[in-house]
Image (cartoon, rainbow, N blue to C red):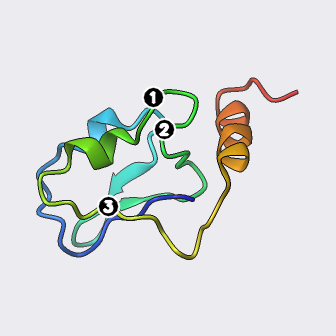
Amino acid sequence: MALMITDDCINCDVCEPVCPNQAIYMGVEFYEIDPAKCTECVGHFDEPQCVSLCPVACIPVNPQHVESRETLMQKYLRLTGQAA
């Protein structure tokens, strides 16, 4: 499951630099997450870094991009050039 940032985002700039996949970027009004790059930090960390650091808890699972942990790992491998 890719994550998403809701409109509760206060643009505090905490999430963007901690994303290991560079999936977080500034959108028109607030930060957004590219679901093609988001692995929920699978392969990098035990938990999503953006979620653990967000001061307003505005980063839920994106219901339009539901993915299994295995799918997230495959995405991680592809993004890091380790895919077989």
Query: Do callouts 3 and 1 mark residues in contact (Cβ within 8 Å)?
Result: no
- Quadrant hosting residue 47: top left
Question: What amino acid is at disc 2?
Answer: Cys
Question: What amino acid is at disc 1?
Answer: Phe
Residue under the point 18% across and 65% down:
9
Q: Which mark is residue 41?
A: 2
Q: Position of residue 66 (x, y in %)?
A: 62, 66
Residue under the point 32% across and 61% down:
59
Secondary structure at numbered mark 3: loop
Work out which residue is located at the far right of the displayed protein and give it: 84
Q: Which mark is residue 30?
A: none
Q: Residue 7, relative to residue 33: is it above or below?
A: below
The residue singled out by tag 3 in the image is: 59
Q: Earlier in the sequence, mark 3 or mark 1?
A: 1
Nearest the camera: 70 or 65?
70
Placement of the C terminus among the 4 image quadrants: top right
Q: Position of residue 44 (x, y in %)?
A: 50, 27
Query: Do callouts 2 and 1 mark residues in contact (Cβ within 8 Å)?
Result: yes
Q: CA distance from mark 3 to mark 1?
A: 17 Å
The residue singled out by tag 1 in the image is: 45
Nearest the camera: 71 or 30?
71
Placement of the N terminus among the 4 image quadrants: bottom right
Work out which residue is located at the far top of the displayed protein and give it: 82
Residue under the point 19% across and 50% down:
54
